[in-house]
Image (cartoon, grey):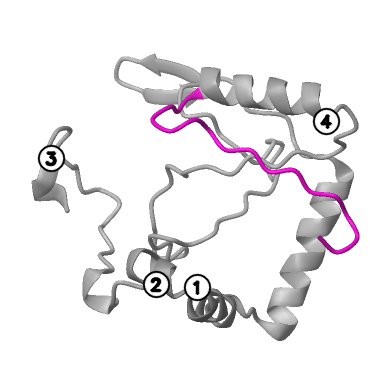
Amino acid sequence: MSGHYVAIAVMPEGEYGQTSATGVIKDMLNSFPNIRIGLMVGIGGGAPSAKHDIRLGDVVVSSPQDGTGGVYQYDYGKLIQGQGFQHTGFLNQPSTLIRTTVSGLKTQYKRKGHKIQETIKTILDDNPRLNEEFRHPGEDKDRLYRSDVVHAAACGEACV
């Protein structure tokens, strides 16, 4: 990809969490000992706000700021009665190469935008069997919930 060798791994079906991710990473590094950069892609737990209109399917790239590493681990902190959750640490920041690349991509996006929709359309047009499962469901299915909405923990089919 752009002159680089790329190795991709996925979590085993039905598995998630830090322990499974650590196992996948360990296996990747054993199989490919010369890997220089690793990107972990997962499901973010953030919520949209007036400033950040985040929708289902959006790609969000975190960047270090205010002395943090850029990624907050949801269970990396302590809960103090009457004070709420307080972060006690954060994951380390990415390498200089990654941070420089992200900065360059931000600049490119500001200048030229992106071609994500065109790329998705091309892939779906070239692979019609994927169309049913991966096409955009339509604006009527794109629900943007307020960040203070509390969802039922076990709502089953009713949440769809």
Q: Amino acid at mark 2?
A: Asn
Mark 3 → mark 1, Cα distance in angstroms: 31 Å
Q: Where's residue 97, x and y in %? A: 88, 48
Q: Which mark is residue 127?
A: 1
Residue at image position (59%, 44%) is: 41
Residue 66 x, y percent position in the rendering: 68, 42
Q: Earlier in the sequence, mark 3 or mark 1?
A: 1
According to the picture, the residue beneath numbered tag 3 turns out to be 156
Gap between marks 2 and 3, in whole Å? 26 Å
Q: Nearer the viewer, residue 157 or 13?
A: 13
Residue 54: which numbered mark, if any?
none
Please name the residue that numbered disc 4 is placed on: 32
Q: Earlier in the sequence, mark 4 or mark 1?
A: 4
Marks 1 and 2: CB-CB under 8 Å? yes
- Assess whether mark 1 and mark 4 are in contact (beta carbons under 8 angstroms): no
- Choose mark 4 or mark 1, whichever is in front: 1
Quote the CA–CA distance across marks 2 and 4: 33 Å
Number of the front mark, 3 or 4: 4
Q: Which residues are magenta?
A: 1-17
